[in-house]
Amino acid sequence: MTTRTHPMILIAEDDAGTREALSLRLIQSGFDVLSAHDGTQAIKLLNENLVDGAILDVRIPGVDGFGVCEYIRDNDLKIPVFMLTGSSDGVVRNFLGKLTTTVGGDYFVTKPYDGKALALMLRRALEKPQRDA
């Protein structure tokens, strides 16, 4: 049996450049990464792997980020969930932030974001006891 030495993080992001940059930042920060280009692939990866945390773009094809977050909570995966949005509209961001809480997301992050700060937030989130959801 193989023992992991790094937390496994799922990234669901449809923009390949953003997905690659975030993956690289997390790997450099000591995480292992699984990446998905849409929500359907993200759910498949969640079913096949033990994941310690998730970073989900709100607007990904197929099952959107909120749907993936609901899947995580409905299946009692007690992991921190970060929701990302690139929306520049303040009203939309406020609505999406509230929706994040409604579906069980733990953190809401707007793009552009500081990759180093996001990795630190993720590390701290993994140190906290997770919800009983």
Image (tube, rainbow, N blue to C red):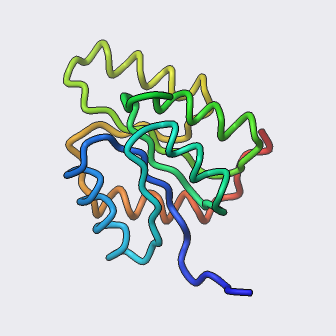
Q: Splitting the image into 4 quarters, where does residue 87 fall?
A: top left
Q: Nearer the viewer, residue 2 or 104?
A: 2
Q: Position of residue 109 (x, y in %)?
A: 36, 40
Which residue shows up at 45% across the image and 72% down it?
A: 31
Say left or right for 70 vs 55: right
Q: Nearer the viewer, residue 95 or 47?
A: 47
Point out the residue furthest to the top here: 91
Q: Position of residue 131 (x, y in %)?
A: 73, 45
Which residue shows up at 42% across the image and 49% down it?
A: 36
Say left or right for 64 vs 132: left
Please say if 44 is above or below 69: below
Q: Position of residue 52 (x, y in %)?
A: 61, 61
Q: Image quadrant for the N terminus?
A: bottom right
Say left or right for 68 vs 96: right
Q: Nearer the viewer, residue 16 or 76?
A: 16
Please say if 92 is above or below 35: above
